[in-house]
Image (cartoon, grey):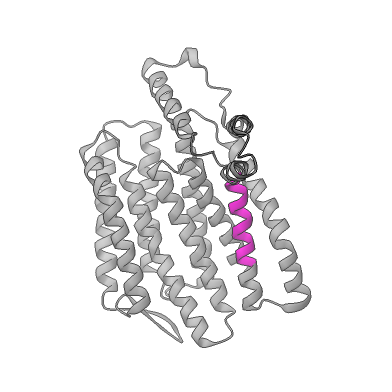
């Protein structure tokens, strides 16, 4: 079970940060990535709770686990809003409201979960629903369902591959969010729940990445596997010694598991955000050499974009509408490069 939870944590965290690193200026990628990242932290809290040396620590980590397990539904609601076509009135209105409303909803959930037993209360036997829990689930479920209906209505008249993919993503968002909210309280064996949700999350993240690459006129697999291979290599380097120490000496103690979780998170984050980190270091190291900084930034940007180039895309054979769409996205994409580098 411990191995399953650690592997789930690694893959969920990598996939969430990968989506964030592709282009954090895109709300659908940002919220989807945040949902996956929060789920990874929830799995980490569950893993740490199982090794807690005292009941007080275990109850605190369990409370944190269930709090984080509910939050992906809120982030994915935001992602679903931005799956709507940009020209629709619903997206414009909901997009203006969501940054404030979503933040307020997250704040209310955190306050109620950490200071009261209204949403759930933790007992030695596990988590039990509180009086506000059914209301929370129903309201958020209705919001998710209404957003799915809006997506279906928006893309019903344009049954393209992209539209069908967005409908599928919206349906998976809805199913996963409601499933996480309805099945946490020991209604299913923990191993089944972790494995089932992890498989769904992997499918969801891949579909989102495929759709984003298609919209940008890019290829996905080289960049996708380059990032995955790099993340696993960094995890092996950072976390391998901790695992060996646990196996040969200390065992799976809370302190060693905390060190393992932190090392894995740092390894994945350093690999995903290597370009922005390197740019920050360059600004310090080469503060007196602006031309050198610009040259290094240009070279890093070109090297990062290469795995995404779609060599099968034939510009001269594109229809006018598709050519204009890709051209606008490319110009916008390179405008954002002034402040951000893509995921490695």
Does residue 344 appear in the picture of this structure? no
Q: Residue at x 33, y 43 (%)?
A: 82
The relative height of residue 172 versus residue 259 in the rendered view (above or below) is: above
x then y, percent, for residue 79: 36, 48
Q: Position of residue 76 (x, y in %)?
A: 37, 53
- Classify the position of the C terminus by image quarter: top right
Magenta stretch: give its range.
260-274
Residue at 58% across / 23% down in the picture?
A: 311
Does residue 98 appear in this view?
Answer: yes
Location of residue 55 in the rendering, given as x and y in whole percent from the top left corner: 51, 87
- The N terminus: image quadrant: bottom right
| Residue 262 within the segment the image draws in magenta | yes
At x 77% / y 77%, what residue is drawn?
A: 249
Q: Residue furthest right?
A: 248
Residue 343, x across and y down, in percent: 56, 42
Q: Could you say which is closer to the camera, residue 37 or residue 147?
A: 37
Q: Would you say the magenta stretch is mainly helix, strand or loop?
A: helix
Vertical placement of residue 119 versus 268, above or below: below
């Amino acid at each position: 079970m411990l191995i399953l939870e650690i592997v789930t944590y690694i893959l969920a965290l990598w996939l969430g940060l990968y989506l964030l690193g592709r282009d954090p200026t895109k709300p659908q990628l940002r919220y989807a990535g945040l949902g996956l990242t929060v789920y990874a932290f929830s799995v980490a809290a569950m893993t740490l709770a199982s090794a807690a040396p005292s009941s007080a620590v275990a109850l605190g980590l369990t409370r944190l686990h269930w709090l984080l397990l509910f939050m992906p539904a809120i982030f994915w609601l935001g992602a679903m809003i931005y799956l709507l076509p940009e020209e629709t009135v619903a997206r414009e209105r909901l997009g203006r409201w969501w940054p404030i409303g979503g933040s307020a909803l997250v704040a209310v959930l955190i306050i109620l979960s950490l200071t009261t037993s209204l949403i759930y209360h933790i007992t030695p036997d596990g988590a039990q629903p509180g009086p506000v829990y059914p209301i929370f689930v129903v309201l958020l479920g209705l919001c998710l369902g209404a957003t799915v209906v809006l997506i279906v209505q928006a893309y019903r008249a344009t049954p393209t591959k992209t539209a069908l993919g967005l409908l599928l993503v919206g349906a998976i968002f809805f199913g996963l969010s409601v499933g996480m909210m309805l099945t946490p309280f020991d209604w299913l064996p923990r191993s089944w729940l972790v494995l089932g949700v992890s498989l769904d999350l992997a499918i969801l993240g891949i579909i989102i990445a495929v759709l984003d690459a298609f919209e940008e006129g890019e290829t996905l697999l080289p960049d996708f596997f380059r990032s995955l291979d790099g993340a696993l290599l960094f995890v092996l380097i950072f976390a391998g010694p901790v695992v060996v120490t646990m196996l040969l000496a200390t065992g799976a103690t809370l302190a060693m598991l905390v060190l393992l979780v932190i090392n894995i998170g740092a390894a994945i984050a350093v690999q995903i955000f290597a370009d922005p980190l390197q740019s920050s270091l360059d600004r310090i190291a080469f503060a007196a050499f602006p031309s050198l900084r610009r040259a290094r930034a240009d070279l890093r940007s070109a090297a990062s974009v290469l795995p995404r180039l779609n060599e099968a895309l034939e510009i001269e054979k594109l229809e006018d509408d598709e050519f204009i769409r890709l051209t606008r996205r490319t110009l916008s994409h390179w405008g954002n490069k002034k402040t951000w580098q893509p995921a490695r």
